[in-house]
Structure formats: structure tokens, C-alpha cells
Image (cartoon, rainbow, N blue to C red):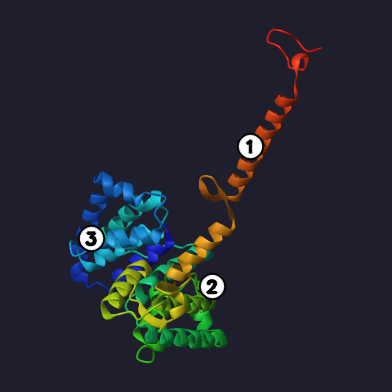
Amino acid sequence: MNPAVQGYTAAVLDESPPDALGALSRDVAAVDRLVRQNADLHAAMTDVALPGRARRAVLADLLGTKVRASAARLCAFAAGAVHAQEVPSAITWVASRLRQVAELDGAAEELLGHREARERVGGYAAAVFEDLSVAELETVEDELFRYARVVDATPDLRSALSDRDLPAEVRRSVVAELLSGKVHPATLRLAGYAVTGGRPRDTVGTLDWLVEQVADARGWRVARVRAGQEVDTAERRNLVERLSRLAGSPVELQVTVDPALLAGVNVEIGDLRLDATARGRLERLREHVMTGGWTDLGFGRLERAVHHDDAVHHDDAVHHDDAGRTGNDAPHEGTEGS
């Protein structure tokens, strides 16, 4: 199963009270049946033309208040984290994992390779980040960085956290004893899972990698909006809702008015760029016109105009050649040329 889905599921389980696990498991099992039995939903979730973020938003909107919020989160994340064809099996895995934990009181994380283990920790972190503000993310980023430096500079601590012979929960308790009450709760959760979901011998590397993930998450929390005119309250609310669904977490707007854009908005969030300004549309039209040519059918691509001109020149040459033929010069039907 996709390691990020494993980590995200572990984070949601950590947040869920023991007496709520049974209900959570039943909700996800119901979603699993729905995705497999509803032909339209199954087709939408397995549509390779639909980006992962779009699949996540669609499923989150569809589930709404029909199931528990934690169940909707889990299924929506799974739908966006895997390839389209794998969505049904990913949700089935989540349902199976929840049932296993609810019935057997959990099971240890399986040992994964270096890259997969980091992806699993990243999935866990994605769930933790969802409830944090931009300011809290900045705090967590700083605390994780400082903690990683302490571990790296303390051989005994690094050795204890990297000891594969120590049970994972023992190593996690070492982290708790060191950090409890001294850092943000999210920092404690991430540092603890780094030694249970990650590779033991990669503790410092995983912590440094987590610092990068926090920075990326912070980038997706701030949407930089350039608008051609003032954005009113209703428009702001609409933008926040749409961008939050796209990012999978609450988004804060930073709006700058730029009259040169004429109208509409230009949005930068994470590594995504959305240009819905009048200036942008005019620039795209200008590019189309400058790289095209005028034909009797209107504006077309330059290549089409060239083909049109070539065809005209060819026809002129044929007419000219035919006009220059006289009598015996022109071939007659039924005769062969020498």
C-alpha cells in the first residue's frame, strides 16, 4: 500500500479516542462499498484525466456530513495520494487497517525501505499539518530543526533512537520524555512518529526531511492573490473555500490590488499558478495572434496559413502550365508519352 496513506491513517488513528474506532471503521467500510458499487463514483475516482487534488476535493465534497469528519478525511486523502486506478484498493486498505486496529488493538508498523519510510512519515505529517495555522507551522519548523541538531550532536541519544533492537514504542517514549511540555504538541507527535514510522538508522535524516515538509506545507497555506480590483468579503470567502479544497487544508489570503491586471485574479499557492486575469487573457490572445496568420477563414496558426499559401501557389503554377500548352503539347486521353 502507498506509504503516505499508511502514515496518514496512523495519524488519524492517533487522534481518535479508542471508543470511537469501531464507528470510524464502519464509516470507512461504508465509503469503500460505495466507491466499488456506484458506477459513476467509481468512474470518477479512477479517471486518469482527473488530478489527485481534484479527486480528493470531489470525494470530500461528496461525503460532506454523511460520515464522520475523520472518515471523510481518510478516504479523501487516499483518493488523492495514489494513482487513479489504485483509489478503490487504497480505500479498501484503509478500511481493513481500521478494522484490524479496532479488533486487535493495533499492530506494529511494517519495516519499509528508506524512501518509502520517509513517505510514510510524510503522510503522517500531512494529517498533523491540517490543523495548524501558518504561525504554528513556523514554530514546528523551528523546533524540529533545533531538535534534529540536538540529536545529531548527542551520540548517546542518537544511538538510543537508532537502536533497532529497542521496541518502537520504547524509542518513542524516549522522545516523549525529552520533549513533552517543551515543544508544540505537533512537534512532539512528528518527532515521535519519526522513530516509529521511519527508519531507525535514518532518524536525523528523517527529522531534517520533516523540516522541509513543514516549509512546503507553510507555502501551501498562504495564497498570494493579485487582483485587478478590490476583492470584497464574499469573493474572499469564495476564494478561501475553493483554494482550501484544492490545498486540502485551510488557506490564508494575501491580496494585492494591481490595476494593471484590469480584472480577475492571479493566484500563487505552493507550486501552483492560476491566472484568471483580464490581462492574462489578453496576453494569451496576443500570443495566439502573433504566432498565427490571416487567411480567408480568419486567424489561424501560422502553419495553416503557410499551407494555404502553398496551395494557392501550386494552383497558379498548374493553371499557368496548362495555359502554356498548345495542340500537340497537351497529352491526349489514350496516348502514352515517349
Q: Give the residue type that dot 1 points to.
A: Ala
At which x and y percent is residue 194? 44, 75
Closer to viewer: mark 1 or mark 3: 1
Residue sitting nearer the eye, 171 or 244: 244
CB-based contact (under 8 Å), mark 2 and mark 3: no
Q: Which mark is residue 63?
A: 3
| Vertical relation: 228 (above or below) 120 | below
At which x and y percent is residue 25? 23, 60
Q: Which mark is residue 24?
A: none
Q: Which mark is residue 201?
A: 2
| Vertical relation: 238 (above or below) 143 | above
Q: Give the residue type that dot 2 points to.
A: Arg
| Residue lying farthest to the top in this orientation | 334
| Crowd tier of the residue under label 2, counting other residues whose Cα lies within 10 Å: few below 14, some 14–19, many 20 or above | some
Q: CA distance from mark 2 to mark 3?
A: 40 Å
Q: Quadrant of residue 264?
A: bottom left
Residue sitting nearer the eye, 162 or 262: 262
Residue sitting nearer the eye, 331 or 65: 331
| Crowd tier of the residue under label 1, counting other residues whose Cα lies within 10 Å: few below 14, some 14–19, many 20 or above | few
Tell me which residue sits at (20%, 59%) in the image: 27
Badge 3 element: helix
Q: In screen coordinates, is 66 left or right of 252?
A: left
Q: In screen coordinates, is 289 left or right of 80?
A: right
Mark 1, residue position: 311
Badge 2 element: helix
Q: Is residue 118 visible?
A: yes
Q: CA distance from mark 1 to mark 2?
A: 70 Å
Badge 1 element: helix
> Which badge, 1 or 3, is on the more N-terminal residue?
3
Quadrant location of the C terminus in the rendered image: top right
